[in-house]
Image: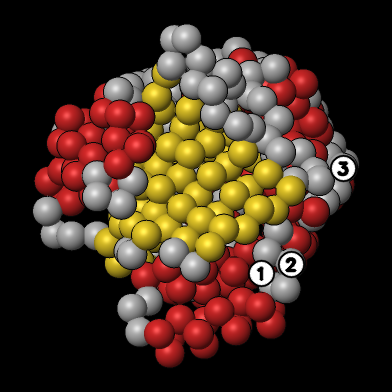
């Protein structure tokens, strides 16, 4: 890369949301550049559950049918606890995808050279003459942009520039992985989730041979060291379930080591979603950079996909389907900046209430899981029943056409 570049629209981060945003803009006839710190596509987290609202977005992006062939249709969610078992039949589409399948499908549908790898963004500021955003990369490269969209995850440089608070942490962590059964796993087409004491075990079939599983438990100081070694992650997961879930020990013991992750669960508090400043001028955020939430209702990834469609729709509507201007037309760039700002304001307005509800439900569920006092559990449960009487109502949301 040269020491100085000019790009009309730059998306920071080539995760699910960043790639979906680039693809949504591309479908609206708007080109962009995605800058990614890694040297290749990343798919941390092994797999991701996608409810009906997410599949509607994937269809809008043109990758839904391709991805359906890679994941079985799930029929129910089965929750078990010492108090008994509940089964929620899924009347709408619900599948679990390998993250790598989703990432690759989004990337493969982008124009060649859209993604620039090995570009770690370390700072953002504004050009004092044009007020346009300038990205500074770790290798000293400077990218002068007209529009910057931060899809750079939990530790977002763009979110930090907007003044958003650093994400908070639950006292919980999650170990996630994949296990392949060459002769077939024989599990029912259900998302099984069982709670015992302070530990949760989840199992979701992806296809007839591949299973995604996770173990949720309390975070310990030793987990910072464990999270860097796949074998230690596996052994810790086996140790945490062997007494309460002995039948599932072999599933974890035979997992694909390379798929394993151990992460402390983080969130952006609902009141920060309500009051947060998610855009400024021609800079905005989407995905985890905007609304990182715990995995308790399975909407983190799909919410980012929804962001992509709404953002591209608002942008194209305001810009007339053309998101770039010629660098020499300084007057037009000033007009465009105002129009981009208006588009981002509309995007944030459309998304705020939706992600406020998702974040609130996820936040309360996380508090319920980690709470130890019966009185606190009862209060949180009552709030959940009052605010979200249908625990799967979030899956019916339709963010609209691209």
For disc 1, the neighbor class at 10 Å (few under 14, some 14 to 19, many from 20) is some
- 252 left or right of 307 in image: left
Which residue is pictured at 80% across the width and 43% down the height?
92
Residue visible at 41% across and 28% down?
A: 178
- Spatial CA distance of label 3 from label 2 is 25 Å
Asked if the residues shown at circle 1 and circle 2 are in contact, with their CB atoms under 8 angstroms apart, the answer is: no
Does dot 1 land on a helix, a strand or a loop?
A: helix
Q: Residues within 10 Å of mark 2 (few under 14, many from 20)?
A: few
| Residue 37 on image: x %, y % | 36, 32
The quadrant the C terminus occupies is top right
- Residue 138: name its quadrant: top left
Question: Which mark's residue is nearer the viewer, 3 or 1?
Answer: 1
Q: Position of residue 18 (x, y in %)?
A: 56, 38
In this rendering, the answer to whether 93 lies above or below 186 is: below
Q: Distance between the residues labelled 3 and 1?
A: 21 Å
Q: Mark 2 points at which residue?
A: 390
Mark 1 or 2, which is nearer the eye? 2
Q: Mark 3 points at which residue?
A: 401
Dot 3 or dot 1, earlier in sequence:
1
Residue 128 coordinates in the image, percent (x, y): 48, 57
Q: Nearer the viewer, mark 3 or mark 2?
A: 2
Q: How many numbered circles are shown?
A: 3
């Amino acid at each position: 890369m040269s020491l100085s570049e000019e790009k009309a629209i730059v998306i920071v981060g080539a995760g699910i949301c960043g790639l979906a945003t680039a693809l949504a803009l591309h479908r609206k006839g708007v080109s962009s550049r995605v800058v990614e710190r890694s040297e290749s596509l990343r798919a941390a987290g092994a797999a991701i559950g996608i409810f009906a609202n997410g599949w509607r977005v994937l269809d809008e992006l043109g990758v839904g049918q391709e991805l359906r062939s890679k994941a079985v249709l799930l029929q129910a969610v089965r929750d078990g606890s010492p108090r008994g078992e509940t089964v929620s039949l899924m009347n709408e589409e619900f599948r679990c995808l390998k993250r790598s399948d989703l990432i690759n499908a989004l990337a493969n549908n982008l124009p060649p050279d859209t993604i620039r790898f090995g570009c770690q963004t370390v700072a953002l500021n504004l050009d004092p003459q044009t007020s346009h955003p300038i990205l500074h990369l770790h290798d000293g490269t400077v990218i002068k942009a007209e529009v910057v969209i931060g899809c750079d995850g939990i530790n977002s440089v763009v979110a930090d520039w907007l003044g958003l608070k650093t994400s908070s942490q639950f006292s919980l962590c999650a170990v996630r992985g994949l296990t392949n059964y060459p002769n077939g796993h024989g599990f029912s087409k259900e998302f099984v989730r069982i709670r015992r004491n302070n530990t949760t075990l989840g199992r979701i079939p992806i296809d007839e041979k591949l299973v995604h599983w996770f173990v949720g438990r309390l975070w310990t100081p030793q987990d910072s060291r464990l999270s860097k070694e796949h074998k230690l992650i596996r052994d810790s997961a086996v140790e945490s379930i062997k007494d309460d879930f002995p039948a599932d020990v072999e599933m974890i013991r035979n997992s694909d080591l390379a798929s394993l992750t151990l992460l402390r669960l983080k969130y952006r508090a609902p009141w920060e979603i309500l009051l947060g400043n998610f855009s400024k001028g021609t800079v905005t955020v989407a995905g985890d950079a905007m609304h990182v939430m715990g995995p308790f209702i399975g909407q983190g990834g799909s919410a980012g996909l929804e962001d992509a469609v709404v953002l591209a729709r608002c942008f194209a509507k305001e810009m007339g389907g053309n998101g770039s201007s010629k660098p020499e037309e300084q007057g037009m760039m000033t007009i465009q900046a105002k129009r981009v700002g208006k588009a981002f304001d509309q995007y944030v307005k459309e998304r705020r209430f939706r992600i406020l509800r998702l974040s609130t439900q996820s936040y309360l569920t996380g508090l319920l899981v980690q709470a130890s006092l019966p009185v606190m559990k009862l209060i949180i449960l009552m709030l959940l029943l009052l605010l979200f009487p249908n625990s799967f109502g979030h899956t019916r949301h339709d963010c609209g056409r691209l």
